[in-house]
Amino acid sequence: MEPYKLGEMEEKFADLIWEHAPVRSGELVRLCEKAFSWKRTTTYTMLKRLCERGLFANENGLVVACMSREEFQGARGEQFLAENFEGSLPLFVASFVRRKKLKEEEIRMLKDLIDSYEEELP
């Protein structure tokens, strides 16, 4: 099981938790029944699965996020790069731009992003 790969329903469930966290487990059951027509056991099974992956924790009936949605997306991106591009962002970008021409606005945004990180370096 890869920690940063989620199935479709796991992704929707995680989004629901991030939207409401911290949330009492009983309230989460009600939210899932309304959003997905899940029974209580389905909610707890899915919650246990995502807790085992380190995304969330159930602390005495209070479900909290162990990482934000943005942190999760960043970790998922790092995992993708590691698995497909030897962990190299430049290799990924080079591969991407060979297949799809970047728009001027996208190029400017990338340059601005790089410049902002260079300014932060000691």
Image: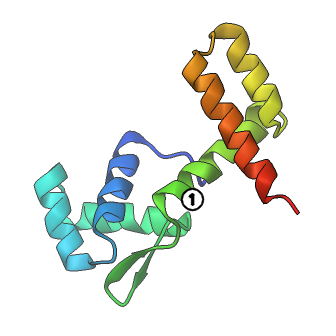
Give the percent coordinates (x, y) of residue 53. 55, 63
Give the percent coordinates (x, y) of residue 23. 28, 76
Element type at mark 1: helix
Q: Residue at x 33, y 72 (%)?
A: 21
User: Which of the 4 quarters of the picture holds residue 19?
Assistant: bottom left
Category of crowding for the residue at label 1, using alpha-carbon neighbours closer than 10 angstroms: few (below 14), some (14–19), many (at least 20): few
Labels in figure, total: 1
Give the percent coordinates (x, y) of residue 1. 60, 51
Q: Residue at x 55, y 45 (%)?
A: 5
Q: Look at the picture and state if 84 lies above or below 57.
A: above
Q: How is the image coloured?
A: rainbow
* Amino acid at the residue labelled 1: Glu
Q: Residue furthest right?
A: 122
Residue closest to the eye, 55 or 91 = 91
Give the left or right position of residue 32, taking residue 56 as reference. Answer: left
Give the left or right position of residue 119, taking residue 20 as reference. Answer: right
Q: Look at the picture and state if 26 lies above or below 114.
A: below
Residue 2 visible in the snapshot: no
Q: Residue at x 59, y 17 (%)?
A: 104
Give the left or right position of residue 33, taking residue 122 as reference. Answer: left
Q: Which residue is mark 1?
A: 71
Q: Look at the picture and state if 26 lies above or below 95.
A: below
Q: Residue furthest bottom?
A: 60
Residue 21 visible in the snapshot: yes
Q: Residue at x 52, y 55 (%)?
A: 70
Check the picture and name the quadrant holding the C terminus. bottom right
